[in-house]
Amino acid sequence: MNSTPAPATRSARPAPGAWEDLVTAALLGTDRRTPPAPVDGREAPVALLDAAAEATVRRRSGLRPAPAAPRPAPAPADPRPPLPAAAARRLGTLLADRPGTATGRRGTTPDLMELLPQWLAAANARGWAPPPQALPALLDAARGRTDLRPAVLEFAGPRALWLARLNPDWRFALRAAPGGGTALPDPGRREEIERLWQEGLFAERVALLSALRARDPEAGRALLAATWGMERAEDRLMFLDSLRTGLGQDDEPFLEQALADRSRTVRATAAELLSALPGSALAARMAVRAGACVALDRTRATPTIVVEAPHECDPGMERDGVQSAAPTGRGERSWWLGQLVEAAPLSTWPGRLGGRTPAEIVTLPVADDWQGELHAAWCRAAVRQQDGGWARALLGEPSAPDAGGPGAVSLAERAKLLGTLRPAERADWVAGFIAAHGLSEAFQLLGVCAVPWAAPLGRAVVDALNIARDAGSYPWSFSGVMGLAERCLDPAEAGRLDALLAVPDEPEDASPGAGGYWAEAFQRLMTTLRLRAAMLRELEAPATGPAADHHSRDADAADR
C-alpha cells in the first residue's frame, strides 16, 4: 500500500456570504476565531489574507453593470455681478488663514481669519457674487465657525445650498438657510402658503411664518392661530418666538390666549411679549402689582423710595409669567419683586413717584437696601421696552465716580442699556467712560458699539492704550481691547499710530520686555488697519484688466 500522502488540493472558496466572517476573524484574531476557509498547512493569518484577497477579486469581478444614478440638476444661476479680481484674490488669502495654523507670538502679522467677517459684511453690502471655485472653502470656514454662517450663506448664495446637498459635511447650510434652502411661496399665492404651512417640514414652517410676519404681521398670526391647538409644545414655543417680528398691539388677544397654554415656557414667552407692549392688559396688571410694592415716602427729610416686596406668588401672577421658584441664592420676595417691576411699563413710575423724570427717580434714595434690586429691574425693563430715556438715566454720566451711573449694577447691564441708544450716542458715552476710567472695564462696552468706531471713540481707545503703554502696564492685559481695535478702529486712524511704533523707555516698575511687546502690538494694529483699508478699496467697484492687477499688486505690497 502506497503510504505517500495525496497532494494537497486547492481549498474550497468561501461562500459569497462569508465576507462578514472574514472581517470578524480579522478583527478578533485567528487565535480566537478560526478563519472561514481551510488552512491547508498554511499559517492561519496567511490563509485568512489569501481568502480575503480571493473574495475581494471575486466580489469585484462579479458585479454587474447597474443603471447610472441620475445626474444632479445644474447649479442655479447667481444674478449678482462677479467679485472684482483683486477682491477675489484677497478672499482666497483670508480663507487660507485657518484657525490653529499659527503658533507662538503673532508678531506684527494681522489675524486674517478675524478680518473675514468684516470682509464678508462689506461684500454683502455691495452685492457681489463669489467666484465659484471659492465656495468649498467658504463652506468649510462656515462649518468650523458658526458665527460666520449667516454672512457666508448670504455671500455664497444659491450655489452654496446646491453644493450642500451633495456633501454631508455641509448639511449645516441647509439647516441654517430659511426653510432648509427651499424657496418660499410668493406672498400672493395663498393656496401654496397654506399647503406649505399644513404639510411642510418644521424648518420650512418657521421660515414661512417669519417671512409672513416681516411682510404682513396679521397674515402670519392668522396662519399660526389656525393650527395653534394642534402644534407640539416645543413647536409652539418656536412659532410664538417668531411673533417678535412685527410685534404690535393687534397681537395682544392671541398672546393673552397663550397665557393659558399648558406649557410653562410658552406661557413665559407670551408674558414677555405682552410686557413689551406697554398698552397691553398684562402690562396694566403688572403696573398695579408693581405699584403696590413701590411707593414714595414724603415724611422723611429727603423723599425716599420704600419697597414692600410681595409676600406670595398668587395664581394670577403665575399666569402672567411670574416664576414662583427662585434661583438658588435668591430670596423669593426679591425674585418676585424684580419680575413685577421688570414687566411693568416704565411710564408707571413718574406718576407713582411724584411726577419726577427718570433721571430724578434713579437718584432718589431707596430704603432698606432695595436699591440694587429695584434699579436692576428698571434696567431690564428699559432694555425690554427699548426706552432710551430710562436707559440714559440708569447709565448716568460716563464720568461718574461709580463708573456706571446710579442704576447699572454690572457691565453686562450697562452694555444692554447702551444697546437701546443710537449708535452715535452709544459711541460718545463709551468714549467718555474710557476717558474717565481707562480700558480696564471697557471691553464689554466696546463690543456694543457700531463698526467702524466713531472718531471720538477711536481716539479715546488709542489715547488710553498710549497711556497704559507709557505707564509700563502689563501689555497682555490689554490684548482683548487691542484685538477689538484691529477689527473696529476706523482705518483712517492709522496715521495717528506712527508715533507709537517706537519701543518706549520702560519705567523702573514696568513689566520686563513690555516696551517691545507694546511696539509690536501697535505695529500689528497699524498693519491691520492698512490691510482693512485695502480690502475696502478692492470691494468698492469692479476693476478688471492690467491696471486693476497692477493696483492689486501695489496694495499687496503695502500690506506686507
Image (cartoon, rainbow, N blue to C red):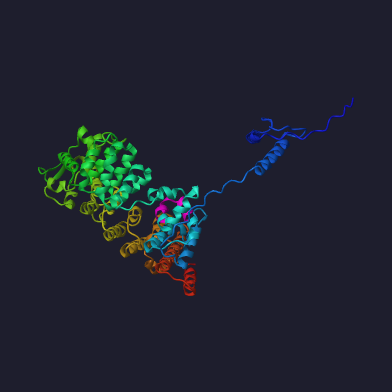
Which sits in the foreground, 395 or 127? 127
Does residue 66 appear to the left or right of 345 in the view shown? right
Quarter holding the N terminus is top right
Q: x%, y% of residue 67?
A: 57, 47
Q: Residue 310's image quarter?
A: top left
Which residues make up the magenta segment?
A: 138-151
Q: Does 325 sit above or below residue 138?
A: above
Determine if the magenta segment contains residue 399: no
What is the residue that sits farthest to the bottom in this orientation? 547
Does residue 474 appear to the left or right of 1 in the view shown? left
Which sits in the foreground, 233 or 1? 1
Determine if the magenta segment contains residue 147: yes
Q: x%, y% of residue 432?
A: 28, 59
Q: Does 478 sit above or below residue 496?
A: above
Q: x%, y% of residue 470?
A: 39, 62
Which sits in the foreground, 286 or 319? 319
